[in-house]
Image: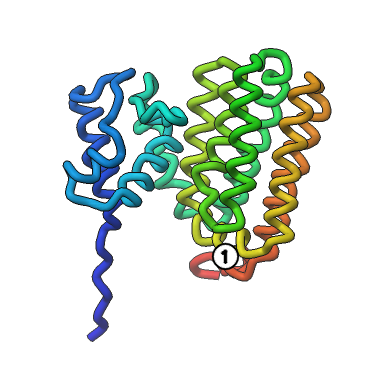
Amino acid sequence: MKLRREQRTPVYKNVMAQIRKLIKEGKLAPGDQLLPERQLAETLGVSRPAVREALTALATMGLIEIRPGGGAYVREVNLDSLVEPLATVMFTDQESVFHLVEAREVLECQIVRLACQRATERDLHRIRENAFRAERDMPSGKADSSDTAFHVGLSEATHNPLLISMMAMLSGLMREAYGPCRAQLLADREMVDRYNQQHFRIYDAICRRDPEAAEAAVREHLGTVKRELQELPDTQAQREEPADGA
């Protein structure tokens, strides 16, 4: 008889589920501010890191917006109907990570072109701050939220709600799909430095209002992601695994 180890649901996912339930039931409406992190932790009887991780995940899904120094707010667009079915399909496909990177490249290239035209000084400041946050967080392996904030921040500079929602959705899918691979990638300091340099090249191109340079910088960045993923043992094994019945 084979025994399987029971998998407990991570605490942060339970926190996510409770907040999502409140949103679905209308007890938290678009624009409502969530309780501060400390109060949420005390109310739910969990640690602050668990609350922080839950809020980050909800933000990448596009359900809430985290404003630096201003708390977390429920967003206008609820993406559950898009994210959940897509996640079910993507995560059963061996090529899921590469499909996601490809989709993001198509979307983000157009996003930065629009950002070159529409970004305000406030948008540019936010993108710059997010680039510095990612640079600070990556060496410690805690860059998920700051890296996501950088890329979603690019979409926010388009001032197109649909593009913002699509980027948030793709970021959430990528977070789920290649989370285990990401830890391996961020263990390489040279690679981390390369990612950060590429972030600042994207930012600089948008500041110069140069759409060609901005698109080229995005393609370079995501090309690096694809190459690094292809060289990881885990993703190589996935790509080489034969299909059922082969």
Query: SS class of the residue under badge 1?
Result: helix
Q: How many marks?
A: 1
Quadrant housing residue 153? top right
Q: Quadrant of residue 187?
A: bottom right
Q: Amino acid at mark 1?
A: Gln
Q: Is residue 80 left or right of residue 100?
A: left
Q: Quadrant of the N terminus?
A: bottom left
Across and down, in percent, residue 105 comes to 67, 37
Q: Where residue 96 sits: x, y (%)?
A: 54, 51
Looking at the image, residue 7 lies above or below residue 21:
below
Query: Between 46 and 78, which is closer to the camera in this rendering?
Result: 46
- For the C terminus, the image quarter is bottom right
At horizontal 61% and vertical 57% (from top left) the residue drawn is 139
Q: Name the side, left or right, on which 205 lies relative to 96.
A: right
Q: Position of residue 154 (x, y in %)?
A: 62, 28
Tell me what residue is drawn at x 40 percent, y 42 percent.
57
Pointer 1 residue? 238
Answer with the quarter of the image where residue 24 lies.
top left
Relative to 134, does residue 214 appear above or below in the rendering?
above
Q: Residues within 10 Å of mark 1 (few under 14, many from 20)?
A: some
Q: Residue furthest bottom?
A: 1
Image location of residue 83, percent across then percent down: 41, 37
| Residue at screen point 31% across, 45% down | 51
**Residue drawn at (25%, 28%) of the image:** 23
Does residue 78 appear to the left or right of 175 in the view shown? Answer: left
- Describe the colour scheme in one phrase: rainbow
Q: Front-most of 1 and 24?
A: 24
Depth check: give the residue in front, 51 or 2.
Answer: 51
